[in-house]
Each structure stands twice: as C-alpha cells, then as structure tokens.
Amino acid sequence: MIGCPAPGWTVDSLVELFRDHGVRIVSLMHIGGDGWLKTLDFVPRNLSHLEDILLGGERADGSSLFGGLGIPPDASDIVLRPRLSSAFLDPFSPLPALVLMCGHAGRDGKLLPQSPDTIVRRASDRVRVETGAELHALGEVEYFLGRRSAESDIYGEHDRGYHASSPFVFGEALRRSALAILAEMGIPIKYGHAEVGYIESEETEGIIWEQHEIELALTPLPEAAEAVALAQWVLRNLARREGMRCSFDPILRKGHAGNGLHFHFSPIVEREHLGGRGVDGLLTEEARWLIGGLVQAGGALMAFGNRLESSFVRLWQAKETPSTISWGEFDRSALVRLPLVATTEEGRPICPPTIEFRLPDGSAHPHLLLAGAAQAMVHGREMKDLDALLKNTFSSSRGGPASPRTHVPRGFAEVADALTRHRAVFEAGSVFPSTMIDSLIETLQS
C-alpha cells in the first residue's frame, strides 16, 4: 500500500495510508513487564492529532505496566514511543485499525531501563560492540489447539502427529492462515507444520488437543522477540475466531509432549553466519562464546524462559527435553545443540548454521530471554576456563563415556540460586536493572 520497504516509512506515508484506506483506529501495542502484549487505542480527531500520535506516542502508567520492577506509583509516568517501521493493519479488528509497536521512555525522555524492549535492545547493542558480532535469533513457537471432539475424530495418535497432513490433523487450515497473516504483517517466517503432540479427549473435558509449530526466520534480537509475541497473539485470535482453544503451556497433561519455545541463534560478522564450525572443522570463536555462555548461565536463564510450575514437569518427563547441563551436535536431549544444516546435492547450504537453545518453553518471556542469551555470549567471551567448560559439558552423539553432568534446576528455588550466582552476567553493561533481578529472585524464592 505504501510502495516502499518498511525502513523508508515516514509519518507522511502513514498519514496518507490512514486517509486513503479508510482507517479509523490507531493502536499502540507494546510489551509489558509480564511479557504480554498491551494495547492503547485512539480515534484521531484530525490529521494533526494523528501526526502527534505517530510522532510522540502517549503517556502511560509505568507502575501498572512494570509493577515490582522499581517504578514507584508517585513517579510512574512513562511514554510509549511508536516505531513507524513496525506498522501493520490489524487483521482481527472489526474497524480498520493501524497498529504500531512501541518502546518505552521515562520521564527524562531516555529509554526506560525496566522496559523489556529497552533491555533486549541494549543487550543486542552490547553484544555487537563487545564481540563484533550481530546476534540474530528465531523462535520455534509450539502450541496446542483444542476443540470439542466429535465422531469424525477418528485420526490422531499419541506422539504420532509430526508433519501430519489434513485430514489427520484438524488445525492445518488455522496454521496456514496464521502463516499468511504473519507474513502480511511483516513477520519473516521459515515454515509451519504439525507437531508430535496429540491428546485424546477425556469424558470429563471432551476436548481433543493436537500440537503444531510455527518456526520464525532469523532476525535481530529485538525483532525476533517481538515476532514471537505477535505470533502467539495471531494464533490466540485465530483460535478464538474458530471456536478453538490455543495453549502455549509447557505441559497440558503428564506423559504427553509439552510446548517448547526453542531459540536458534546466529552470530553474524560481515554478513557471514558463524553459528557452527568453520572450514577447518572447529567451532568458530563466536560459536564457542555463545555455547559456553548458554551452558554456564542456562540455569539462571530459566528465570526468563521457564516461568511456570509445569515447566519443570516438562523437563522431568524427558521427552526430548534437556535434563542436564550439556551441549552437543544433533543431540535433542542437550541443553544446547548444533542442528544439521540442509544443503543442496552440490553441498551448498540453503540455511545458515545455528546454535539451538532447547531449554525454554511456552511460558518464556522472549524479550528478557533473548537479552539474557546475548549477555551470556559476552560473558562466554570473557571466560578464562572456556575450553575446559566446553570439554566437560560436551555430549557426544556417538556414545562413549560421559563426563559427570549437572542437572538443570528442578524447581523455582534452584532457579533463584542460579540467578543469584550469575546475576552479574545479566547486570553487566547496565542491561538488566539490579532492581529487576532482585524482584525476580524474591519472586522465585517465594
């Protein structure tokens, strides 16, 4: 509609779109301290009012949005700052609505330290400055769709849904709609498919559940975090529209597959993806830093990536989930793994090599988790015993004697202990406010 790529969008181009396409509503969307999308709606009175919204945003109550993170109620005014390049038309609004994603500024006009948007952007900037690499990421958004069972539900089988096609899955049409909507919103997608999970209905509930996945595409950390939040928003809205339920819970029923939220990372230097081994067969330095940092701080990262009691149930029942602090190639039971890179018959890679962090689940706060991973990479670069750590935590896919392993935290108290031990990793460079870490530790301990 605008006629140029998103980085070239201006206030004038959005005003023209608003005027020429009958848009009635402007929505400022943003991420709260709880990781959920928030919305502030406007009906612009005139074009001047519209320009003011696009340029300046609007004030909001920071103590309500970021409660317990150091914003006092008597000085809680913050400002939502729209990003013009993030605009999209709301696919679910009954009235034509233009949505802009926002960051947060404090009363001094500077980026708000407690904002998840601020934290992931500062972490992304820091990893680039201190390592020379720009860190990109993608999320694997797993979810369950549930609906009332019927006599027609004669297909589906426990742990047999991987890559299943219609009519053997009922959620295929919804998944494809989600892929198309996300693409139209400007969210880069890699693919979508049916996943392994399938739960038959019980007489008391009458709901049949099947699992699907949408894998996003590699983007810079702030965009990658936002893409996960928007993907979950789209899926929830589509499920509601179709009379279904959508769940990202880490586990729906014991003994069945849970919802992971695995993240793939790619450190990029001069447009070269370095998330694996070089031509010499050795791990790149950037890959070593990231793997070492994730292994070292993995337990503490659970404060951002595994936030429900059911998170631990998912890990305990060990269905391709990491239970020990380890890394390996192709190993789906490792905390960190190097996945296979698909190539053409001539050997040309068709996708970048990545480093997969398999610990997070559907309860994750993507902004804080990705910021923590970036901080862990910088920490990995600074570690004196990195070689020994990588050697002692390597999980060989070929078997053989294994080094003694440390279990991942098995409860919130152990996550609190890990975060207490490694809090300096996250607070370095003033990325995570110390008051936020204090609050997280207190919440985990309680």
Image (cartoon, rainbow, N blue to C red):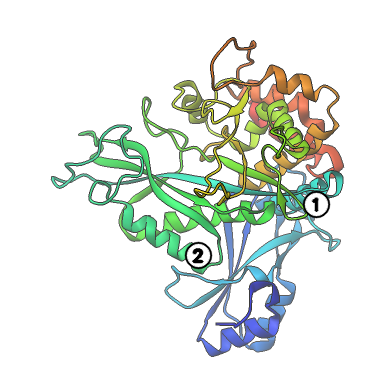
Q: Give the secondary structure at mark 1.
A: helix
Residue sitting at 26 percent across and 41 percent down? 207
Q: Which residue occupies the foreground of this view, 282 or 381?
A: 282
Residue 10 shows in this picture: yes
Q: Is residue 49 above or below residue 203?
A: below
Q: Is residue 28 above or below residue 298?
A: below
Residue sitting at 72 percent across and 80 percent down? 52
Q: Which residue bears the numbered disc 2?
A: 183
Q: Which residue occupies the foreground of this view, 6 or 90?
A: 6
Residue 261 is situated, as x and y percent measured from the top left of the image, at 53, 41
Residue sitting at 52 percent across and 25 percent down? 333
Q: Quadrant of the N terminus?
A: bottom right
Q: Which residue occupies the foreground of this view, 378 or 51?
A: 378
Q: Which residue occupies the foreground of this view, 319 or 331?
A: 331
Few, some or many residues within 10 Å of mark 1 (<14, 14–19, 20+): some
Residue 403 is situated, as x and y percent measured from the top left of the image, at 64, 12
Name which quarter of the figure residue 401 lies in.
Answer: top right
Rendered image: mark on residue 125: 1
Q: Inspect the image, locate mark 1, and give the three-letter code of the amino acid beneath it.
A: Asp
Q: Inspect the image, locate mark 2, and give the three-letter code of the amino acid beneath it.
A: Ala
Residue 407 is situated, as x and y percent measured from the top left of the image, at 60, 17
Q: Is residue 192 above or below residue 332?
A: below
Residue sitting at 67 percent across and 38 percent down? 276
Residue 329 is situated, as x and y percent measured from the top left of the image, at 58, 30
